[in-house]
Image (cartoon, rainbow, N blue to C red):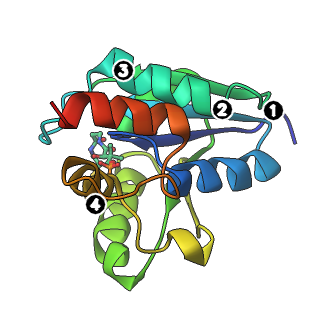
Amino acid sequence: MGHKIAIYPGSFDPITYGHIDIIKRATVLFDEVIIAVALNISKKPLFSEAERMDMIREAVKDSPNIYVDSFRGLLVQYAREKGAQAVIRGLRAVSDFEYELQMAQVNRKLDENLITVFLMPHEKYSYLNSTIVKELAKFNGNISCFVPPHVEEKLIQKLRP
Ligand code: PNS
């Protein structure tokens, strides 16, 4: 079957326990998982490329076969360069579905050999996203159950002057 590589792309601004849950599931299925921070997408990130990558690295440091990288431009092009067979995306709720379906279909149109694999996080993370975590952090909400301690620390530094 060969060495199976999956790309897990996203903004990761910042990484949450929801992302980490998906990464753990992906490592069961693939020999190698590359977490790829997407740059030059239209969203304006709170954290720099280096900050986002450092926070991911720290979160997955005890897991073998996980690599952290960043990319610019098209995901299909990047996946091809890495020799990846699959793209991982997390699906939390039906509300994610339409956008994810659209992306998966566009990516398949661009490269029919690249397979999108949807994984569902544990239901305790089904309502979680980075935007909500940033909002909570800004207004002193408790975020310790949503992000690892090192990410919580960075969020507090950045958002609570
Ligand atoms: O975490 P996000 O922001 O939902 O991730 C979205 C991401 C980065 C996966 C998506 O925007 C992407 O793949 N961008 C790279 C540009 C690209 O390939 N676009 C065509 C796919 S529709």
Q: Give the spatial CA distance, label 1 vs label 4.
A: 37 Å
First in residue order: circle 4 vs circle 2: 2
Q: Nearer the viewer, mark 1 or mark 4?
A: 4
In this view, the residue farthest toward the top is 50
Q: The disc labelled 3 sits on which kind of residue? A: Glu
Q: Which mark is residue 132?
A: 4
Mark 3 crowd level (few <14, some 14–19, many ≥20, 10 Å Cα): some
Q: What residue did someone put label 3 on?
A: 51
In this view, the residue farthest toward the bottom is 94
Q: Give the spatial CA distance, label 2 vs label 3.
A: 15 Å
Element type at marker 1?
A: loop
Q: Nearer the viewer, mark 3 or mark 1?
A: 3
Q: Give the spatial CA distance, label 3 vs label 4.
A: 19 Å
Q: The disc labelled 4 sits on which kind of residue? A: Ile
Q: Say which of 39 and 51 sits in front.
A: 51
Q: Give the spatial CA distance, label 3 vs label 1.
A: 30 Å
